[in-house]
Image (tube, grey):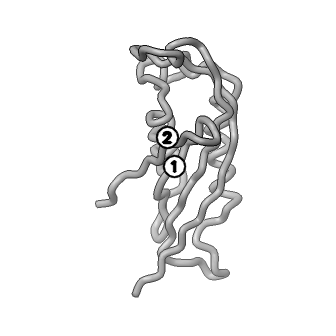
Amino acid sequence: MAARYQLKTHVNFCAAHQLRGYEGNCARLHGHNYRVEVEVEATKLDEIGIGMDFRDIRAETEVIASELDHRFLNEIPPFDEVNPTAENVAAYFFRRLSTALNREGARVAAIVIWETERCSVRYTELSD
């Protein structure tokens, strides 16, 4: 049976947003202390036994989070056109991190965005 390693780390950032087209409180300007969980799946290890270095995963995630931190998401592409829902924020992190981190034997498997300590969304894409 082939080995699979699930690596997970997280990064936090704070941002404000408004949900366009939403009927309720979230249509008004408000903010969240977001938690971004990055799940990486590795199917092979390097010469010292690492699937993907946690430092690399965190560093790339922190770059993206720093671009959004203490900002109004509705003013930042792609959220100036795409509603800045937790679902869309998760997809954004997934695609950016996949471009930066995916390689033979290791890939971004999922992103979990926590808007509050009780509410999150997990985003993944089917592999070919």
Q: Earlier in the sequence, mark 1 or mark 2?
A: 2
Whether pointer 1 and pointer 2 mark residues with C-beta atoms closer than 8 Å, the reply is yes
The image quarter containing residue 12 is top right
Name the residue at 39% across, 14% down.
Answer: 21
Q: Quadrant of the N terminus?
A: bottom left
115 lies above or below 107: above
Q: Residue furthest top?
A: 28
Category of crowding for the residue at label 2, using alpha-carbon neighbours closer than 10 angstroms: few (below 14), some (14–19), many (at least 20): many
Name the residue at 48% across, 51% down.
Answer: 98
The local secondary structure at tag 2 comes to helix
13 lies above or below 78: below
Q: Residue furthest left?
A: 128
Residue 86 coordinates in the image, percent (x, y): 50, 34
Category of crowding for the residue at label 1, using alpha-carbon neighbours closer than 10 angstroms: few (below 14), some (14–19), many (at least 20): many
Residue 5 coordinates in the image, percent (x, y): 53, 73
Name the residue at 62% across, 18% down.
Answer: 30
Between 25 and 100, the one lying in front of the other is 25
Q: Quadrant of the C terminus?
A: bottom left
Query: What amino acid does circle 1 point to?
Result: Ile
The local secondary structure at tag 1 comes to strand
The image quarter containing residue 71 is top right
> Mark 1 to mark 2: distance in Å?
6 Å
11 lies above or below 1: above
Between 29 and 45, the one lying in front of the other is 29
Name the residue at 54% across, 58% down.
Answer: 39
Describe residue 70's horizontal placement relative to residue 45 as left or right: right
Determine which residue is flagged by label 2. 90
How many numbered markers are drawn?
Answer: 2
Residue 113 coordinates in the image, percent (x, y): 55, 42
Query: What amino acid does circle 2 point to?
Result: Ala
Determine which residue is flagged by label 1. 111
Circle number at residue 41: none
